[in-house]
Amino acid sequence: MDFATASHRQRSRTQAFKQKTRSTKLLRLIDLDFSYTLSLLDLPPVNEYDMYIRNFGKKNTKQAYVQYNEDHVERDVQTEEIETREAWTQHPGEGTAVSGGSGSTDSSDAAAVPKVDTPRLSSFLRAACQVIAVLLEEDRVAAEPSWSPRMQDNTLPFSDRSSQLNTSLPFLQNRKVSCLHASQVQRQTVVSVHGVAEKAFAPVLDDKYVLCVWDIWQPSGPQKVLICESKVTCCCFSPFKAFLLFAGTMHGSVVVWDLREDSRIHQYVKLSDCFWTFRTSTFSTDGVLTSVNHRSPLQAIEPISASVYKKQSFVLSPFSTQEEMSGLSFHIASLDQSGVLNMWVVVELPKADVAGSISDLGLIPGGRIKLVHSAVIQLSDSLSHKGYEFWGTTQTLNIKFLPSDPNHFIVGTDIGLISHGTRQDLRVSPKLFKPQQHGMRPVKVNVIDFSPFGEPTFLAGCSDGSIRLYQLTSEYPLMQWNNSTGGRAVTSLQWSLTRPAVFLVQDDASCVYVWDLLKSDLGPVAKQPVSPDRLVAMTVMGEPEKTSGSFLALVLARASGGVDIQFLKQEWATPVGNEQRKLHLLLQEAM
């Protein structure tokens, strides 16, 4: 027998019995007291008046009462007579007296100035002035006779009509146009770059380069006038809204102008009894970022944004404050001829300092936009392949980013090759785009342009007069035209913004070519020499978003310094049915 277990069980029973006995004795002593009663809800009955007020008060009304004058017992209506007074007011107020009336007014009322929403009023006046200016320009053009010899001389055979920018202004005299660039989002905005004056005119402007921002619907004068100390070699607008202008110079600096700045912080010059505002650059990389600055002349400057070619609708004024903040989330790429590609981040400061910045010496006092260096890519390394050493140092001439994927870019060189790369230095195929001819030739790829309609294709124009059509996945061109310009160098080449199968070309012999691949893939369908005032620059403008009334225009800069706009005929501007699909099938057949 297990005596230890039996002994433990016995002790447990004895302890439990003691606890039960104690609890029984305590329960006899504990009892609940029900002598106090408390009512938790005391709701008196609702009388008829309270019920009426509760129901009637739900109708957004309140009960009010009036007191009658009981001593006027002889009157039918026993109330006080209502006092009335005539009053007038003026908005917006001018001066101290902004209101008045027939009765006696308090002196404090006349001194009170009504509250005016200044930003809203400024925005309205800015947009209204822009509309009125456009209407006045249209009235002026309509008043000119259509048979004017000047208009007939300027209109080219492939154009319906033409207009001319007013470059006869005092500060544009004896200045040649070196560059033209049109905004990709503000379709009516274009900038012209003018060289130094050949004859002395004004000491403060003679050694300066002038940039004019134009609205083509207001050709009588530029919207903004900018000045630069160094020669401008390339320029571009901000990708979402044309209120920032970037430029690259011969000395390797990158400058930016903020077109929203108050004109009072810039220089005023009186010319021919008229005051003009000449805007200096908001930010410049000169002497500030010495370690990362370019040491060679800049060849191209491009915005990096995936939404450059997205369809967007904007108000008429290109400098309004609406949606301006959305345009600052992008980068700028600058390329020099030695193959250095710099990436810059566009930064907007929260507050402008009129005293200037101690750390950012390139920032103008009162400016808010600056550039921060992000990355650098040495393109010369990717162009150093075996078999090319005897050509010496390869020069990079231009760069374009793929619109659908700005991570990819292509670079034109002076040895007839086009380099393909990425910003993250990833492996790409093909690395080089070559011509159909085998072997190396000293041919410059002067201009390249991606299709703005989503196709991964691009055009390249060369110094030997050849034009190549590439697909991004193929090393050799789908099509190549060697004698389309008669051996003359291609100086400008751009896709049409309204038709996927049309592009326009300019050569160094002052001749313009119109290509329509659906009509002919063997050569241009129209050719127009421009003389005697020869061409020095060309750019293309258009509005593809409009279903009706779209336009395609050529902005042409002449050797005399004049700039005219040629609105092409509708057969070149209006797309045909399923044009993009037909072009896609044509390119597939070429492959």
Image: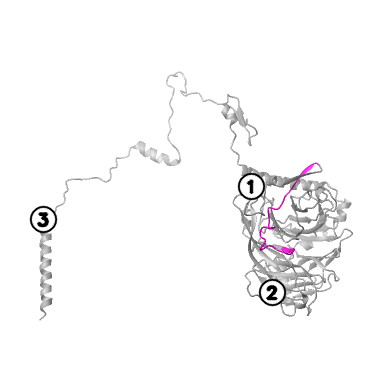
Q: Position of residue 170 (x, y in %)?
A: 82, 48
Is tag 2's residue or tag 3's residue first in the polypeptide sequence?
A: 3
Identify the image quadrant of residue 255: bottom right
Q: In which quarter of the image is the C terminus?
A: bottom right
| Residue at 60% across, 39% down | 116
Give the label on residue 335, or none.
none
Q: Which of marks 2 and 3 is in front?
A: 2
Q: How many numbered dots are placed on residues in this image?
A: 3
Q: Distance between the residues labelled 2 and 3?
A: 101 Å
Distance, label 1 to label 3, CA atoms, is 92 Å
Say which amino acid is labelled 1: Ala
Q: Judge by depth and name the residue closer to the eye, 185 or 156.
A: 185
Q: In this view, does 69 lie to the left or right of 378?
A: left
Q: Where is residue 585 in the image (x, y as percent from the top left)?
A: 72, 74
Majority secondary structure of the magenta segment? loop
Image mark for residue 355 = 1
Q: What element carries label 1?
A: loop
Earlier residue among tags 1 and 3: 3
How many residues crowd around disc 2 within 10 Å: few (fewer than 14), some, or many (20 or more)? some
Can you see residue 301? yes
**Label 2, on which residue?**
382
Residue type pointed to by label 2:
Ser
The residue identified by callout 3 is: 28
Question: What x and y, as percent, mark residue 557?
Answer: 82, 58
Helix, strand or loop at mark 2 = helix
Colour basis: one colour
Point out the tag, 1 or 2, that comes first from the N-terminus.
1
In the image, which residues are magenta? Answer: 273-300
